[in-house]
Image (cartoon, rainbow, N blue to C red):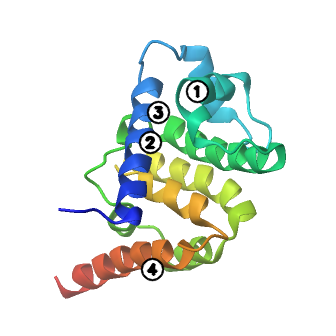
Amino acid sequence: MTTSTADAETFSLASVVSRLARLLAGGGSVSHGDLAALRRMEPQRPAAAFFKLEGLVLDEHLPGDAAERAEMETRWAAIIVGLARLGPLHQPSQRLGFALAEAPYSELRFARLLRADANRLVDELPALARFLAAKGQAADWTAAAQLILSAGRNNEESVRRHLARDYYGSLARQERS
C-alpha cells in the first residue's frame, strides 16, 4: 500500500508533535523551569528552552534560510506553547475539531480561528490551548500544528476544511441527540 505525500507529512508531523509532548511531560531534557518558561513564552520571542527543544527535535524540520527559519521558529514556538499548556491533555486519539465542539468552543471563535492567517494563529493557538486546558478537554495538538504550518501554503484550505468538518459534524451530532 502506498501513502500519499500528505499522509506521509501528517504521519511525520504527528510523530514530531508526540515526541515534543513526551519531552514536555518529563522526558528528562526539559526541566520544570523550562516547562514554566515555555508556558509563558511569547512565540514571537522564543525562550531559551525553545531552542533546547529545537536542537533536540526540530532542527532537521526547519529551513536553512535565515528569514524562513525565523518564521518557522515562531510558528513552532506557538505549537510548543500550546503543548506546554495542554500537558497530558495532548491525546492523539482525540481529534481537535471534535474536542472543540465538546469543550464547547463557540462557533464565533471557531470561525475566527479558521480565518486566521499565520501571524494571527501565533496568538490564537496558545489561547486555544489555555481554553482546552481550563475545560480539561483532551485534544490532538497535531491538528493545531497542521493549521499553523499550512497557513499561506498549498494545503491550507484542505487542513481548514478537515478541521471544520470535524467541528461542525460533532455539533450536528450533539443537536440530533
- Quadrant of the rendered image containing residue 61: top right
Image coords of residue 45 (percent x, y): 80, 38
SS state under label 2:
helix
- Mark 1 / mark 4, whichever is N-terminal: 1
Which quarter of the rendered picture does the N terminus lie within? bottom left
User: From the viewer's perspective, is 81 left or right of 63?
Assistant: left
Residue placed farthest to the front in the image?
A: 2
Residue 53 image position (x, y, % from top left): 58, 27
- Local crowd at mark 3 within 10 Å, few (<14), some, or many (≥20)? many
Secondary element type, mark 3? helix
Classify residue 44 as left or right of residue 135: right
Q: Residue 108, image x and y in percent? A: 56, 79
Residue tagged 4: 161
Q: Dot 4: few (<14), some (14–19), or many (≥20) neighbours within 10 Å?
A: few
* Front in this rendered view, residue 126 or 30: 30
Identity, as a three-letter code, of the amino acid under mark 3: Leu
- Disc 3/disc 1 C-alpha distance (Å): 8 Å
How many angstroms separate mark 2 from mark 1 (CA)?
11 Å
Q: Secondary structure at mark 1?
A: helix
- Cα distance, mark 1 to mark 4? 30 Å
Please tell me whether mark 4 sits on a helix, a strand or a loop: helix
The residue wearing badge 1 is 53
- Pick whichever of labels 3 and 1 is earlier in the sequence: 3
Residue holding disc 3? 20
52 above or below 123? above
Q: Percent x, y for residue 141?
A: 44, 50
Q: Which residue is mark 2?
A: 17
Residue 152, quarter of the rendered image? bottom right
Residues tagged 2 and 1 counted as in contact (Cβ below 8 A): no
Instruction: Tell me what residue is drawn at x 70 percent, y 35 percent.
Output: 41
- Mark 2 touches mark 3? (CB < 8 Å): yes
